[in-house]
Image (cartoon, rainbow, N blue to C red):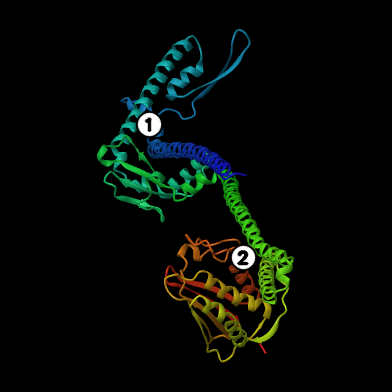
């Protein structure tokens, strides 16, 4: 897949996910707004109902306070010289012309009742008088009720608010109203006057509560404006209550987030695979070039051996033999590099672990490498100061690790100064051996230092075309050091030099 195609798919998927997230966020925001409006309306309705209930309770209080006075008085007692009416009265039974039966109880003055009981032609006159009596009684009772209402209006606001709106009663009414509307969120409340001074409050009520979570209702709104009180209610868990109602959206966001992670991971893998493919292509090109050179040399030497004149010259035969030998070694070395790549496809390399003296092995490698370093006008120094250098390693792979690091130091030497290599070892606490390889080469940029141990990764060498490789050397070094139970780090500064530090555990024996 082309890199441009991957980018197009990435952009399209990114817009798709952004659109999906925006829709979900917009939808959730609308739901939260609707739920908040429903909650607010329910609370306001409950507060209004509580205020009405308190007004009804106050009216009942005044009516009960004066009911005995109302019952003890009668319209006849208001007239001068009238006697108190009979409380039981007289019961009259009669039937209509159609055969219907009815009972009538008449209450009033005893003498008048006696007249009605005697019957006679005066019955209709007595009924008319009774109608007048009941009309007067109704008008009186209405007047008494008007007096009671005026009394409530005039004196009710003088009662303490704690008596008019009892704290326990307010909580009871408010809880009942909220439960009726399905609002089971906990609340705190207080009653304050017009100036905001708290008259009483519940234990958890706060004056500085969130405005969105606080609601207010006027109590007894018909009181004088200077004596108004307000019921304030605060819901500390209102947001949790609202979001709890939309908890069904959480799985949708979770799944979208998981899909986003998978998408990002897939894109990263795609780019890595693309980069790996490019590296493998470079590797094949480099490998072909590296193999072609020694093969061409061997082929040319073989053709020269077919010449009878050359076969007659021992010197020429010796030179051709040396060329074949050198090119064969070079070809074998390249084949070894390719075989090393197979190690990266295994979870565990097959190692032949044995106890060796790291100082001795490193010293022999340095002596072998000295001629190659001196060929380029440089020198190599071995400062093997470790007193205990016994480690459990695979000697072949350990030798390859040191050789690869020294070979890289020669390849990436600076043309401006003579090559200088320092190989050292020293003892460390916790039974560890440190081996360092320091050079004064071209160095490595800081961004590249993090990637030099990656498979197929090659640091750009600018205009230098004499450096060939597969990008496997340092990856092989990293893998083998790790397999041997150690660690390797790199410190480098561009145009100054590079230092590799290997830490290996000492032999347990």
- Residue count near mark 2 (Cα–Cα under 10 Å), binned few <14, some 14–19, many ≥20: many
Furthest-bottom residue in this view: 387
- Residue count near mark 1 (Cα–Cα under 10 Å), binned few <14, some 14–19, many ≥20: some
Tell me if 393 is positioned left or right of 58 in this view.
right
Measured as percent of width and height from the top left, residue 99 is found at 63, 11
Measured as percent of width and height from the top left, residue 386 is found at 55, 89
Measured as percent of width and height from the top left, residue 279 is found at 60, 56
Residue beneath label 2, please?
A: 472
Q: Which mark is residue 73?
A: 1
Furthest-top residue in this view: 97
Q: Quadrant of the N terminus?
A: top right
Front: mark 2 or 1: 2
Is any part of residue 459 visible from this angle? yes
Is any part of residue 348 visible from this angle? no
SS state under label 2 = loop
Depicted 477 relative to depicted 107: above or below: below
Circles 2 and 1 in contact, beta carbons < 8 Å: no
First along the sequence among labels 2 and 1: 1
Q: Residue at x 26, y 46 (%)?
A: 195
Q: Quadrant of the C terminus?
A: bottom right
SS state under label 1 = loop
Q: Which mark is residue 371?
A: none
Q: Nearer the viewer, residue 338 or 127?
A: 338
Q: Nearer the viewer, residue 455 or 181?
A: 455
Tell me if 162 is positioned left or right of 370 in this view.
left
> Label 2 to label 1, Cα distance in Å?
117 Å
Quarter where residue 352 is shown:
bottom right
Tell me if 333 is positioned left or right of 149 in this view.
right
Measured as percent of width and height from the top left, residue 75 is found at 37, 25
């Amino acid at each position: 897949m082309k890199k441009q195609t991957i980018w197009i798919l990435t952009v399209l998927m990114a817009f798709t996910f952004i659109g999906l997230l925006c829709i979900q966020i917009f939808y959730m925001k609308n739901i939260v707004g609707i739920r908040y409006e429903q909650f607010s309306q329910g609370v306001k309705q409950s507060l209004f109902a509580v205020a009405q209930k308190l007004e009804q309770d106050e009216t009942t209080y005044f009516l009960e306070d004066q009911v005995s006075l109302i019952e003890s008085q009668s319209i006849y007692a208001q007239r001068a010289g009238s006697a108190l009416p009979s409380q039981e009265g007289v019961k009259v039974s009669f039937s209509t012309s159609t055969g219907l039966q009815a009972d009538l109880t008449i209450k009033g003055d005893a003498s008048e009742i006696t007249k009605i009981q005697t019957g006679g032609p005066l019955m209709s006159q007595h009924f008319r008088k009774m109608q007048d009596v009941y009309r007067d009684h109704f008008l009186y009772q209405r007047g008494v009720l008007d007096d009671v209402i005026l009394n409530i209006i005039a004196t009710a606001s003088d009662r303490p608010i704690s008596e008019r709106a009892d704290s326990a009663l307010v909580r009871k009414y408010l809880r009942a109203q909220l439960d009726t509307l399905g609002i089971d969120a906990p609340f705190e409340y207080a009653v304050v006057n017009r100036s905001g001074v708290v008259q009483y409050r519940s234990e958890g009520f706060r004056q500085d509560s969130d405005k969105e979570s606080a609601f207010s209702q006027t109590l007894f709104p018909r009181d004088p404006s200077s004596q108004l009180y307000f019921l304030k209610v605060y819901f500390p868990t209102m947001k949790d209550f609202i979001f709890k109602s939309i908890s069904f959206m959480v799985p949708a966001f979770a799944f979208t987030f998981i899909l986003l992670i998978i998408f990002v991971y897939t894109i990263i893998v795609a780019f890595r695979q693309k980069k790996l493919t490019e590296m493998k292509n470079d590797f094949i090109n480099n490998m072909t070039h590296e193999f072609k050179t020694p093969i061409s040399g061997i082929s040319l030497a073989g053709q020269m051996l077919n010449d009878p004149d050359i076969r007659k010259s021992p010197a020429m035969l010796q030179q051709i033999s040396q060329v074949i030998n050198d090119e064969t070694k070079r070809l074998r070395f390249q084949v070894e590099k390719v075989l090393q790549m197979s190690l990266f496809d295994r979870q565990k390399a097959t190692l032949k672990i044995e106890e060796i003296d790291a100082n001795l092995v490193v010293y022999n490698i340095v002596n072998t490498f000295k001629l190659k370093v001196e060929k380029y006008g440089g020198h190599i120094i071995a400062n093997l100061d470790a007193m205990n250098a016994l480690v459990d390693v695979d000697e072949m792979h350990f030798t390859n690790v040191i050789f690869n690091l020294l070979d890289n130091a020669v390849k990436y030497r600076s043309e401006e100064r003579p090559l200088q290599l320092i190989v050292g070892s020293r003892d460390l606490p916790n039974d560890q051996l440190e081996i360092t390889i320091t050079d004064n080469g071209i160095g490595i940029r800081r961004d590249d230092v993090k990637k030099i141990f990656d498979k197929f990764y090659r640091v750009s060498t600018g205009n230098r075309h004499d450096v060939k490789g597969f990008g496997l050397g340092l990856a092989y070094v990293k893998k083998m050091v790790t397999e041997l139970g150690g660690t390797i780090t790199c410190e480098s500064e561009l145009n100054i030099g590079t230092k590799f530090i290997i830490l290996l555990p000492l032999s347990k024996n």
